[in-house]
Amino acid sequence: MARMHPRTLAPHILKDPKRSSEVRVYDRIRDQVPDDYICYYSRSWHQADDDGAEYDGEADFILAHAQHGLLFIEVKGGRVSCREDDEQWLSTDRDGFRFKIKNPIAQAKSSKHHFLKRLNDKRRLGKRFIRARHAAILPGSARPARALGPDAPLEIIAFGDDMDTLGKWLVDRMKDGGEVREHPLGLDGMQALDELVTGHFELRAHIGTSLAEDALVIERLTAEQAWLLDSLEDNREMAISGGAGSGKTVLAIEKAFRSSANGRRTLLTCFNAPLANYLKDVCKDRPNLVVASFHSICRALAEQSGISLPENSGPEFFNTLLPETLIEAVTKSPELGFDTAIVDEGQDFRDSWLNALRLCLRDVPDSEFYVFYDDNQRLFAQDYAFIRALPQSSISLTRNLRNTRKIHFLMSKWYQGKSSRAAGPEGEAVGVIEVKRPDLAIGRVKERVAQLVRSGQATPGQIAVLTGRATDVDSELFRIAGAETCRADSIHPERIVFDTVRRFKGLSRPCVFIVGIEDILEPELVYVATSRANLLLELAGTGNDISRFGITVRE
């Protein structure tokens, strides 16, 4: 049996009465031609000449053999005839309807010359003079006594009489005669032909288009979250939980805006310095609003109240001394206290730190203390009792608004909090950049980023390259795809972020590439790494390390 392309005919072809003759020929070739032949059915082609004129054509069948070359076949059903006055070819069906058809010999020759030219353009074939023939099959017509024309001798046409032995007829047609200078198609020619005529392909998505469309959906969904604050307006203390991408930071910012707009001295704080810098940028020029990382606000209030701090910066200094100094500063200078304190990424805070912040609230009846937290992210938290003791919002943030559904599906494997569902667009599949050795990953990612940037699909400011190895970012900043990089705590809108997964916690960018995944071992850190991308996430590493993230790597 010959190897057929396509392997099976689509239902719409099998049901089309106009293609019944082609279906019969397809079946005969499949069943009667030996298996060292390959047959391609219905191969359309397009070409333009030197003057810009364009031509379209189709080869009903192309039969190929490494030794015997190529045979281009045109099939015409019905009873075929040619008018004497204008030499117009006609076909008459069983109901007696007659209609015009193209000259099958001319069609087969056109296809032959077109594909031979295309094959000759393949450098690896070296202008080889490939053995090629053309033929016509008229399964609804009986064999005549004489040739159909000077270009249509009977030996290049098969008729209804030949259908039972069509396979042998086709093989003989390919083997008959030939010039001495003709060369076999060869295995390389077979491969070149397959690349030329097969219709299977899978294009890489144009990320630029996807980014723009998906970003609009996410922006709209995130804005809708503000209604939750309306429902909680009468609550003075509140803990609000939600997974990555559920809009916690957006709500924290909105709460800070509303509070400060009402003339209340408001603090918006978090643990991570890069996230704090992002919040400062978003909230700049807002009166009555102070934005700082937790330890920065401790230092700042101590300085403002005239309390001196030791130069020691060990664990005890950050874990105990600075929080105690915060309380001392507000006690000494009550005007430094706050009417509203809002904590983002509260799961990163020790209980004693949260207690210190609550003690910074002014002694007024309507003081507010809000903690937004992710009950799955616990990269830095030592305890959790304070948050559990706070009144919990009856409305949980259970919709992932920031990430596409494809990214949410991956990151949700590492989430153990309240169930979360994806509300965003479907998005692109999580990408895999497989390398043989971990040290090759960054080079491959640079190539991928360069391709996106140079093709205009993404800008440097939309991209972050994050690593699980802290040593990767110890060196000086370098360029990726010709663009300068920046750290997570000094994000520049026109630069690619290059930093560790830990330092990028709480932040996001449309396109994120993860390297150093062999060092991302804790489930919580995998969760953070896989949730930083809004729209495009790609992981680079060995097949074993990528599989550990929950992604199936193709063999």
Image: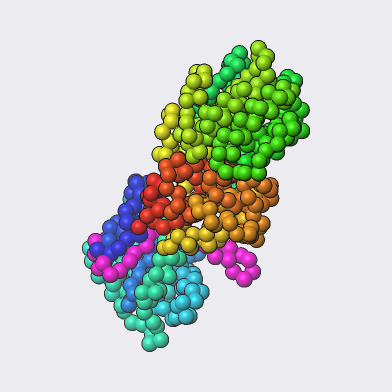
The span shown in magenta is 31-55
Number of numbered tags placed on the structure image? 0
Residue at x 45%, y 56% (from the top left corner): 541
Residue at x 73%, y 24% (from the top left corner): 333
Q: Is residue 236 visible?
A: yes
Q: Is residue 214 visible?
A: no
- Is residue 457 depicted above or below 282 in this figure? below
- Is residue 459 depicted above or below 323 in this figure? below
Residue 36 location, quadrant = bottom left
- Residue 25, x across and y down, in percent: 31, 60
Q: Quadrant of the C terminus?
A: bottom left
Residue at x 38%, y 87% (from the top left corner): 180
- Is residue 393 depicted above or below 156 in this figure? above
- Residue 317, x across and y down, in percent: 59, 39
Q: Is residue 175 magenta?
A: no
Residue at x 28%, y 72% (from the top left corner): 171
* Side of 528 where 284 appears, left or right: right
Q: Nearer the viewer, residue 21 or 34?
A: 34
Q: Quadrant of the N terminus?
A: bottom left
Q: Nearer the viewer, residue 515 or 95?
A: 515
Q: Nearer the viewer, residue 443 or 451?
A: 443
Residue 211 location, quadrant = top right
Direction bottom: furthest residue: 180
- Residue 363, x across and y down, in percent: 67, 16
- Residue 453, x across and y down, in percent: 62, 55
- Is residue 267 depicted above or below 108 in this figure? above
Query: Which color scheme is applied?
Result: rainbow
